[in-house]
Image (tube, grey):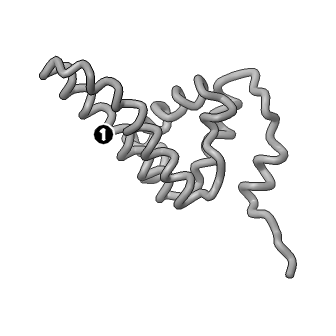
Amino acid sequence: MVVRPSAAAVLVLLMPQRFDTFSEFYAFYLTQHATRGCRRVHVIGSAMVLVLLLYVLITASWWLLLALPAVGYGMAWTGHAVFEKNRPATFGHPFYSLVADWVMFRDVLSGRIAW
């Protein structure tokens, strides 16, 4: 039995793990979100974070701020486990990954990236 890596897996191996610019990282990030299912779970998670943040601000339930990372990352990591079967970029590049999540959210909402 011959096991062949997916194109995305090969690309990950070929991509540098150090990125000089956010643009370089974002190109890599998009390869890690190639399936619509993964992108959809990310977008839903980001929307849930915004709704929860709005709720916190309206109700002054500040303790709920602790739930923001669990909601956002929980949804995103589920998307990677279920749809992409890859390791989230968050673990190697936490800051760029956080920014890229919101850039992708914007790109999906604006129609630049397929929902």
Q: Position of residue 58 (x, y in %)?
A: 14, 21
Residue furthest to the bottom in view is 1
Please identify the residue farthest to the left as the structure is shown.
59
- Judging depth in this view, the residue of 95 and 26 nearest the camera is 95
Classify the position of the N terminus by image quarter.
bottom right
The residue drawn where x is 78% and y is 27% is 18
Q: Is residue 64 above or below residue 70?
A: above
To which residue does mark 1 refer? 48
- At 22% from the left and 26% from the top, the residue drawn is 54
Q: What amino acid is at disc 1?
A: Met
Where on the picture, by quarter, is residue 51?
A: top left
**Residue 66 in the figure: left or right of residue 57:** right
Element type where label 1 sits in the image: helix
Q: Residue 74, image x and y in percent?
A: 44, 43
x, y percent for residue 9: 75, 55
Which residue: 27% across, 27% down?
Answer: 64
Q: Position of residue 25 (x, y in %)?
A: 67, 32
- Outermost residue, right side: 2
- Work out whether 95 lies above or below 82: above
**Mark 1 crowd level (few <14, some 14–19, many ≥20, 10 Å Cα):** some
